[in-house]
Image (spheres, helix red, strand yellow):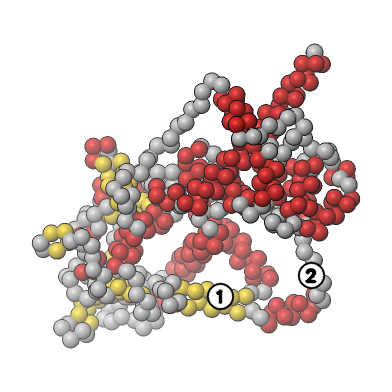
Amino acid sequence: MDPDRVDVVADEIRTLSAHIHAATHRLLTLIAEFDRFKGWEREGHRSCAHWLAFNTGIDLGAAREKVRAARALDGLPETSAAMARGALSFAKVRALTRVATARNEGDLLELARGSTAADLERMVRGWRVANAKDETELERIRHLSRTLSVFPGDDGMYVIRGRVDPEVGILLTRAVEAASDALYRRGCVGGATEDVTPGQRRADALGLMAERAVNAVEDVSAETSTSAPADPAGGDSASAEPAPTSVPISGSRAQRYQVLLHVDVATLRRTTDSGIVPRTTGLGRSELEDGMRVSAETSRRLACDASMVEVRHRADGKILDVGRRTRTIPPAIRRALEIRDGGCVFPGCGLRFTDAHHVVHWADGGATKLENLALVCRHHHRLVHEEGYRLELNPWEGGRPVFYDPRGVPVPDVVPVTEVGPRAVEALMGENRRRGVRPDWRTATCRWEREDDIPLDVLERAEDAA
């Protein structure tokens, strides 16, 4: 073994690592800019992280962390500058951005530069703000302040506000986490969940929790229940509970928990006797049972895959009869769809919690058969109905789904491959130098091997700052 050669190799590893840190900073800067522009929306992806995972081949969890850190660096000028010089690795920046602000980053930065990434991560996780209040009094105040309300807002969205006991809150948190995992980790695979914003991700998870709760009630009920639209005869239709002679007021427990959408079949149609019209006017009835109006296109989306009950009316508006509940997608066809598509067919998605989408809507005469159906998750189902996207099944390629964005441009369905030249490392280092970044073997090296080696004044300043 040549000791001199070992030293040369070691220095080259440290220097190249610093160049990679600097290049990663450039990558994060571009990601933050792309995220601000919402460039990922143009191709129909759920978030910048989904776009990044699809286009760069990294794991979705890693993509989410990069997007989170990129956003945070915008407000941390000293941390950003240190990483741009190659002095901070992404692992250290990832830990710092969880606690650093523009006011305290100076005190944290010295600790981050000198510590190992593992020590920094452990210290950041351990710092907590203590509460000096008497625990008994605090618990009494907490319990008395518990409340929950769910009500429709002025803009057509529902507003949820509340405070719950700590044990209820942690249970709710775990339930939201479990629902988020089920929705966004594609079963058991994936990383952390940052879809669009954390708040939007939790809202999606809450919807899944509500569905599961309703399904649990349905499983223990022997009664039949319904939930959606249809009136093939063209009269005013309303989703309702089937009964031998009348519409029940309350019904079984499972029936009371159903979500009903009342909608005229004419509101669902895009076709008339004279042919296709550009878009439904949305002036017909389309409302939830509490009177909350939903758009015609939203009604079409909900009616793609739901239970339907036909309600016929007399000329004076009184109900003539209520038909039996039917499913727009029979169970056998649904199972075949699950086998064929295996999840959402939008490029790069694949989520397994899906709706069955009619390519030609059943209200326009579209058949409920495999050749006219595709599985899409709720996000992409909404894109197809409310956001101007279009889905076609290419008959010349075995029914391959093809999505078009609102401009009519096909959404790429293959991962783009970008290959670098044979002298990629030299090019990377040359680009860093062109931008004034000239790290050496000492730039990213840790000063303290263990947490016990950190000077007490440095550690105390960082802990106080965090």
Q: Secondary structure at mark 1?
A: strand
- Closest to the observer, 262 or 278: 278
- Left or right for 132, reference 416: right
- Closest to the observer, 60 or 341: 60
- Closest to the observer, 232 or 158: 158
Q: Residue furthest left?
A: 274
Q: Earlier in the sequence, mark 2 or mark 1?
A: 2
Asked whether residue 271 appears in the rendered view, the answer is yes
- Closest to the observer, 445 or 271: 445
Q: Quadrant of the C terminus?
A: bottom right
* Residue 145, quarter of picture: bottom right
Q: Are marks 2 and 1 in contact (CB under 8 Å)?
A: no
Q: Is 12 drawn above or below residue 66 in the view shown? A: above
* Residue 15, quarter of picture: top right
How many numbered marks appear?
Answer: 2
| Rendered residue at 54%/45% (across/down) | 31
- Left or right for 442, reference 225: right
Q: Which mark is residue 13?
A: none
Q: Secondary structure at mark 2?
A: loop
- Left or right for 73, reference 237: right
* Residue 279, quarter of picture: bottom left
Residue flagged by tag 1: what amino acid is it? Arg
Which residue lies under the disc numbered 1?
161
Q: Residues within 10 Å of mark 2 (few under 14, many from 20)?
A: few
Residue flagged by tag 2: what amino acid is it? Asn
**Residue 227 locus on image (x, y percent):** 35, 69
**Residue 37 locus on image (x, y percent):** 47, 51
Q: Which mark is residue 131?
A: 2
C-alpha separation, residue under disc 2 versus residue under disc 1: 25 Å
